Each structure stands twice: as structure tokens, then as C-alpha cells.
Image (cartoon, coloured by chain):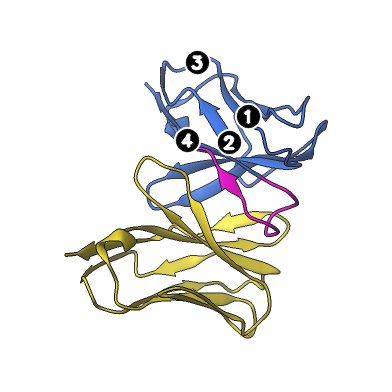
Amino acid sequence: TQLLEQSPQFLSIQEGENLTVYCNSSSVFSSLQWYRQEPGEGPVLLVTVVTGGEVKKLKRLTFQFGDARKDSSLHITAAQPGDTGLYLCAGVLNDMRFGAGTRLTVKP
Amino acid sequence: NAGVTQTPKFQVLKTGQSMTLQCAQDMNHEYMSWYRQDPGMGLRLIHYSVGAGITDQGEVPNGYNVSRSTTEDFPLRLLSAAPSQTSVYFCASSLTGTGGPEQYFGPGTRLTVT
């Protein structure tokens, strides 16, 4: 059983559409990170959220940490083909635990 | 600045063989870790180290050994490879413990055990 559940597992959309992916858990985390991974490469950190209710924006990407620090969401506005990749969330307890990821495909 | 490097990039082993996956970082990071990534499972922490001479087990440590004799290097040893260890292995480093500053990942080693 995954400590962090990510949904949806797969998402295929057209360029210009908006989307939201979710990362949920029953555990409380001291912080949560989102990564993006491209085929054949290691994950690259996008953002770290620490405070419950925190919202961070990175250009067209908006990250939110739940008030109870158990869940998070990633919203992408006007998706582009360059956003294609595997999006992973990772929560910090005594160590770091990753979700299985959302595989996003943005079609031109 | 090379960041985190891993060798080899690909490896095929037969059941029962041993090997060492190499990981090195040139950023003077204290914290280093090893993950394995399997389809539908995300990344799972194998072992980690908070500094030279200090290592600890992660979520899936069985079948793997590590040591940390220098700040730069953190090798992962498979003593007797099993088909269940077929996976992609990633090494990562960061300045402080998990969840703090950015974790930098290496490019990965794809291991197949037949």
C-alpha cells in the first residue's frame, strides 16, 4: 500500500487545457515536494511546501499544501507539450516517501 | 560542475552475482540516498546517509549494503543479485536531511537480473 496516493495515474490532454493532479495520504507530513521526471532521467525538484494551506506558484504551475498537511495538489494552466512527464509527490516523515506518480501527456 | 553521477548506466547480472553501483557527488552535500523505481511503485528508499561514516536503512533495505567512507561517494552493493532486484536505481544528494533543500538525483542505473 502506497503511503502517498497520486491521482490520476495517467492523464492525456490537448495543448492549452488546464489540469489538476492530486497527492493524498492519511499521514501528516512535515513538508511535501513535487518532482518532474522525464524518460531516462532522474527526478527534478519543482517545489517544496512546508506550511499547511501554503500555495506556491511557478509560472503556469500552482502547488497547494492541504491545511492538515496530509495532501497536496498541482494545477497546470494552459498546458504545453513541454509539460509532458511523470509528476511525483514526495512527503517527509522520518525519511522521504514517494507516490507512484501521474504520467501526463500533453498533445500539440 | 558534474552534480550527481552514477555508473554504470546499464547492467545485466545473473542470479547470485554481486556488483556495486557507484554514486558520487561534487556538491559537498551531507545527505545521500539510494532509491529504486519500479513501474507503478514510485521511488522507494533503500538506504541513506546523513554524513560520512553514518548510514541507515530506508523502506526496502533487504539485499543491499551501503557504506559512506567519504562525503563524495555512496556506493550500493548487491551481494547476491535476485530477479526481484531488477529495477532502475537512483542516487540522490542534498545539503540537509530529507525534505529540506533540493534533492539532486543522478541519471539512474538500469539493472536487469536474469
Q: Are marks 1 and 2 in contact (CB under 8 Å)?
A: yes
- Residue A34 as seen in the image, left or right of residue B26: left
Chain where mark 1 sits: B
Q: Are marks 3 and 2 in contact (CB under 8 Å)?
A: no
Discs 4 and 2 share one subunit: yes
Determine if the magenta segment contains residue B95.
yes
Q: Nearer the viewer, mark 4 or mark 3?
A: 4
Dot placed on the residue nearer the N-terminal end, 4 or 3: 3
Q: Which residue is mark 4?
A: B108
Tell me how far mark 1 sits from mark 2, CA to CA: 6 Å
Q: The disc labelled 4 sits on which kind of residue?
A: Gly
Residue B82 position, x and y percent, is 47, 25
Tell me how far mark 1 sits from mark 4, CA to CA: 12 Å
Mark 4 lies on a secondary structure that is: loop
Discs 1 and 4 share one subunit: yes
Chain where mark 2 sits: B
* Image quarter (top left, top right, bottom left or bottom right) of the C terminus of chain A: bottom left
Q: Which residues are magenta?
A: B94-106
- Please give the label number shown on residue B4: 2
The chain coloured blue in the image: B
Decide: few, some or many residues near mark 2? Use Cα within 10 Å; few <14, some 14-19, many ≥20. many
Determine if the magenta segment contains residue A79.
no
Q: Residue furthest front?
A: B1
Q: Which residue is mark 3?
A: B16
Q: Which residue is mark 1?
A: B24
